[in-house]
Amino acid sequence: MKLYQGIDIVEVGKFRKIFLRNKNFATDIFTDKEREYCLSMKDPHVHFAGRFAVKEASLKALGIGMAGAGIDHAFQEIETLPGKSGKPVLSFTGWVGRISRKNKIKQLTVSISHSADYAVASVILVGEESSS
């Protein structure tokens, strides 16, 4: 078994300013379902910031980071939605999904915490060992 981990923290105030300054930010970064969920909350910016932290933590866990070929649409390919219990559920599609399959990722775990000032996310990916 191989473990991959990424963590990210977002300052909600700075995130809110970027969000409000760029009218296309939400549609460029978040999926339709993520936008629907966050906009249904009392303070949507805190929830958007948490999901943004998940996206960055996921890229770190995959060893991609914020640069490189294919990164253009990566944020749309990382989606976090509440499961039936309310626990966040993480999924990858597209290019990010291909990187995940290449790394033989079999389990994705995410945790999000936020306050009025900060949102933090931790992503742990569990992959199979490569057979040699």
Image: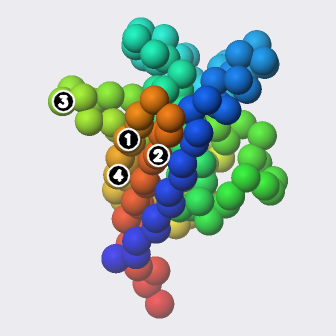
* First of labels 2, 1 by sequence position: 1
Q: Are marks 2 and 1 in contact (CB under 8 Å)?
A: yes
* First of labels 4, 3 by sequence position: 3
Depth check, front residue: 7 or 28: 7
Report helix, strand or loop for mark 3.
loop
Q: Is residue 42 above or below residue 118?
A: above
Residue for badge 4: 109
- CA separation, marks 4 and 2? 14 Å
Q: Amino acid at mark 1?
A: Ser
Q: How is the image coloured?
A: rainbow
68 sits left or right of 29 in the view: right
What label sits on residue 85 in the rendered view?
3
* First of labels 3, 1 by sequence position: 3
How many labels, in total?
A: 4
Near mark 2 (Cα within 10 A), the count class, few <14, some 14-19 or many ≥20, is: many
Report helix, strand or loop for mark 4.
strand
Q: Residue 72, how many percent across, how many down? A: 78, 40
Q: Which residue: 35% across, 47% down? A: 111
Q: Which residue: 78% across, 55% down? A: 67
Q: Amino acid at mark 4?
A: Thr
What label sits on residue 17 in the rendered view?
none
Q: Amino acid at mark 2?
A: Val
Q: Nearer the viewer, mark 3 or mark 1?
A: 1
* First of labels 4, 2 by sequence position: 4
107 sits left or right of 6 in the view: left
- CA separation, marks 2 and 1? 5 Å
Q: Nearer the viewer, mark 4 or mark 2?
A: 2
Q: Which residue: 43% across, 54% down? A: 123
Q: Are marks 4 and 2 in contact (CB under 8 Å)?
A: no
Residue for badge 1: 113
Q: Which residue: 41% across, 37% down? A: 114
